[in-house]
Amino acid sequence: MNIKRLALDAGALNARGTTVIIDVFRAFTCEPLLYHYGVSEIILESDIKTCLAIKGDYIRIGENNELPIEGFDLTNSPSLIMKKGRDFFFGKRVIHRTTSGVCGAVNALPHSDEVLLASFANARATADYIREHDPELVSIVAMGIRTKEHAVEDDLCGDYIESMLSGGTFDHFEAAGTILSNETAQKFLRGDKSYLPKEDPALCLQRDIFDFALLAKQRGDSIVSVRIDV
């Protein structure tokens, strides 16, 4: 198995083989949580106007450069999803739009054999899926800050997934300390912006709490996030 480490918008565009799109803060922490709460479908859509134009009974969740989107039901936050609770989401369909994770997955899908969506929350399940299928090439893409700057949490999650695929070691305690001291977490922990809840970093750093992987798949005219039990 050949593992390539890529990053940001260019990484998503250049990924090949089995691609792992990583967005720890917060897209791909939110999506496994939504499936845990029983949603029936998640559509990945990068275009905001398309998200708003899609007909049907959907919950719209997302952000644009971290800012809430007018007309959406909820911003991209695991703690706010938890506050809504299972009863709010069970059996519902979701449209999900984020600047880094969702846009990265949409960009990677046309030229990848398959695209996995990962965070610390489902990292081991993602690695288990990859080992089971044993692809020749794996592209691990850390999507970073708005797809333009490296984010330490995405890079370290990539390290963790790679360590499980290659037999290396990973110290999650040390990684968590590094992440929490970085501005990507501190901007939440200051608690001065309602759309960046201070609880989110603690939730996003929970490791391997979901035992399923997520695959982005083309389904008709839409791209959907599919739960794959491993």
Image (cartoon, grey):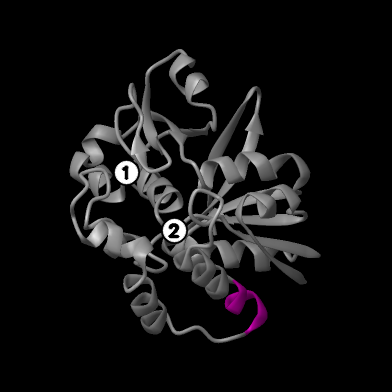
Q: Which residue is mark 2?
A: 24
Q: Residues within 10 Å of mark 1 (few under 14, many from 20)?
A: some
Q: Which residue is mark 1?
A: 37
The stretch drawn in magenta includes residue 7: no
Locate the C terminus and report the quarter of the image it occupies: bottom right
**Residue depicted at x 50% and y 72%:** 156
Q: Position of residue 54 (x, y in %)?
A: 48, 16
Give the overall secondary structure of the magenta segment.
helix
**Residue depicted at x 35% and y 38%:** 67
Q: Quadrant of residue 199?
A: bottom left
Locate the N terminus and report the quarter of the image it occupies: bottom right
Indicate the amino acid at tag 2: Val
Q: Is residue 151 above or below residue 223?
A: below
**Residue depicted at x 36% and y 49%:** 33
**Residue depicted at x 64% and y 75%:** 165
- Please provide the residue range marked out in magenta: 162-167
The stretch drawn in magenta includes residue 163: yes
